[in-house]
Image (tube, grey):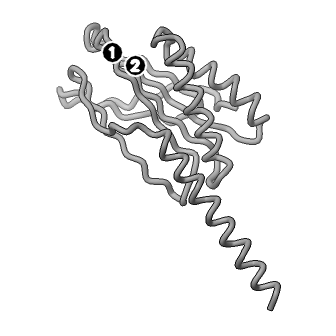
Amino acid sequence: NSRTAKLKVNQRALEKDLEVSASVQKMFLPKKTNFQTGEFKVSGFYRPAAQCGGDWWWYREERDKKVSLVVGDVTGHGSGPAMITAFIATCFQVLDSSFGHDKSIDTLIKEANKELITLAKSEFGMTMLGLEYSSSTKTLKYWSAGSPGFVYLPKNGNTDIISVQGSIMG
């Protein structure tokens, strides 16, 4: 039946689009997923719930014994959220490299949010958390854009759940 054949062609095209989106999305994730700077250790991995989606993370190590980490999640799954994620990842790369790491995570998140509002026109939202740890001053800063809290596991064994309210991006 021609209707069934047409549905199969459409399904194959959609699957191909998802494969391309998933491949593009993987290009924006960190290549190095485990590192330690001072006493701060980061181990990250990516496993999407669907073939592609809106999950993303990024980090930078800085000369002054500081590490910054950002984790984001665009609402929904599929090509749209994957492309929004690619866009946000590009924003972070460009903003961070253009200013030589002079911008705080707070500023990067705010500037990325402005770009997301312009691009997505409220069609997509994004949760994001940002962490900045300085091993020289032993301080941890945390920013939230609608993200849940995180668990902090210091070597002394005292576990802290850190949470801050914030509005979702977009």
Q: Amino acid at mark 2?
A: Glu
Label of residue 135 in the image: none
Label of residue 132 in the image: 2
The answer to which image quadrant residue 169 occupies is top right
| Residue at left offset 65%, top offset 40% | 84
Disc 1: which residue: 66
Q: Name the quadrant of the C terminus.
A: top right
Question: Mark 2 Cα within 10 Å, few/some/many (few <14, many 20+)?
Answer: many
Residue 110 pos. (x, y %) = 62, 19
The answer to which image quadrant residue 106 occupies is top right
Question: Mark 1 Cα within 10 Å, few/some/many (few <14, many 20+)?
Answer: many
What is the residue that sits farthest to the left in this orientation? 156
Q: Amino acid at mark 1?
A: Lys
Q: Would you say 159 lies left or right of 145 here? A: left
Asked whether the residues under the numbered discs 1 and 2 touch, taking CB atoms below 8 Å apart as contact, a structural biologist would say yes
The answer to which image quadrant residue 10 occupies is bottom right
Q: Name the quadrant of the N terminus.
A: bottom right
Distance between the alpha carbons at the discs numbered 1 and 2: 7 Å
